[in-house]
């Protein structure tokens, strides 16, 4: 069969454009079914609460449900690993944080690579930690607490639900010059339950737990942030109390498996940005003590750069301290 010059050029043009068509069509069609967002910690904790707010609002932008699946254990590495091994089609994503996508890489011998086995989608929120104590703690402020810890170090226990929280505990111990027992938990929710019950003495976690302080179930002594929280202006920072090395902010971001098409990652990032900007949702983050990343930083590139920078900061510290997961 012979083609005219016009027919040939039309045919060639269509062929040249063909490779781009599947990507465009996929972006227009995706998603066609529910998306699973793994929260790699138990329900009710500091990752689960904002995760559910974001997932519910993403449904509106994507036209499909975003279903939360809590997969706790090993400081978040079990649920995170499940997503690392998932099909990279945009239907399995994980709500990661400083622990799951930075510190775990230096702490555990993982079956996946935190730096190379994920497609970053977008950074979401950041928050400092607060040092909480059981309600019967006799100390009235941080200075009294430090004195009490030094006098009772042999019987003090502090819980932690992630590697990041463990590292902050160690920084606190080093700064005040004493040591006490650290107790691992599958997540913050069970750790706070034991704190309320008086089974442990201390717990570092996010401002999500401030309502328990207001209810009188626990005490709060200091925050790891650069400034006092608007939610709790009476709680000082560690820095202003003379402990500058106890400084930390925990960030949260969305990740997909490596190989997830960029157009799908962009669509998920846009849906997350819509959730973070929603005037009905954004105040809820503020009420929980979370700060939303600036809109211009809500990109895959920004999250990838954040992970890399934090790995360069925290991995040497973890390795120098000889920390290793079992």
Image: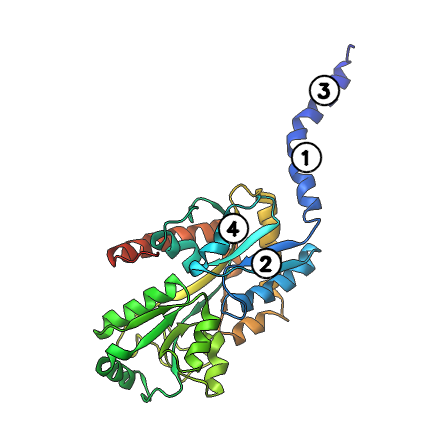
Residue assigned mark 4: 82
Residue depth check, mark 2 versus mark 3: number of the one nearer the observer: 2
Please report whichever mark, 2 or 3, sits nearer to the chain's N-terminal start: 3
Residue under circle 2?
A: 272
Quick one: 43 or 97, which is closer to the camera? Answer: 43
Residue occupied by mark 1: 21
In 3D space, how far apart are the residues under numbered discs 2 and 4 (Cα atoms)? 21 Å
x, y percent for residue 101: 43, 54
Q: Earlier in the sequence, mark 1 or mark 4?
A: 1
Residue located 52% across and 74% down the image: 288
Q: In the rendered image, is residue 225 in sight?
A: no
Quadrant holding the C terminus: bottom left
Left or right of 97 in this view: 38:
right
> For this view, does 110 lie left or right of residue 94?
left
State if disc 4 and disc 1 touch (CB < 8 Å).
no
Return the residue at label 3. Answer: 9
Please tell me whether mark 4 sits on a helix, a strand or a loop.
helix
């Amino acid at each position: 069969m012979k083609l005219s010059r016009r027919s040939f050029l039309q045919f060639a043009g269509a062929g040249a454009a063909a490779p781009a068509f599947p990507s465009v069509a996929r972006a227009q069609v995706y998603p066609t079914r529910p998306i699973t967002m793994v929260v790699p910690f138990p329900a009710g904790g500091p990752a689960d609460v904002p995760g559910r707010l974001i997932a519910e609002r993403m449904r509106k932008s994507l036209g499909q449900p975003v279903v939360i699946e809590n997969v706790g254990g090993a400081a978040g590495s079990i649920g995170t690993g499940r997503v690392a091994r998932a099909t990279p089609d945009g239907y399995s994503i994980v709500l990661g944080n400083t622990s799951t996508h930075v510190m775990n890489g230096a702490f555990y011998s993982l079956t996946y690579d935190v730096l190379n086995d994920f497609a970053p989608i977008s950074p979401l929120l950041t928050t400092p930690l607060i040092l909480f104590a059981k309600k019967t703690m006799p100390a009235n402020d941080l200075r009294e607490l430090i004195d009490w810890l030094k006098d009772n170090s042999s019987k003090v226990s502090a819980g932690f639900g992630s590697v990041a929280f463990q590292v902050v505990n160690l920084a606190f111990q080093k700064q005040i010059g004493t040591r006490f027992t650290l107790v691992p938990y599958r997540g913050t929710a069970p750790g706070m339950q034991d704190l309320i019950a008086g089974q442990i003495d201390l717990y570092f976690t996010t401002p999500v737990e401030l309502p328990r302080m207001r209810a009188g179930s626990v005490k709060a002594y200091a925050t790891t942030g650069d400034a006092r929280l608007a939610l709790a202006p009476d709680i000082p920072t560690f820095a202003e109390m003379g402990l500058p090395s106890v400084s930390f902010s925990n960030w949260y971001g969305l990740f997909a498996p490596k190989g997830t098409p960029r157009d799908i990652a962009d669509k998920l990032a846009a849906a997350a940005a819509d959730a973070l900007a929603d005037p009905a949702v954004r105040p809820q983050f503020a009420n929980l003590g979370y700060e939303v990343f600036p809109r211009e930083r809500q990109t895959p590139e920004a999250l990838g750069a954040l992970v890399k920078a934090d790995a360069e900061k925290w991995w040497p510290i973890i390795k120098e301290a000889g920390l290793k997961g079992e």
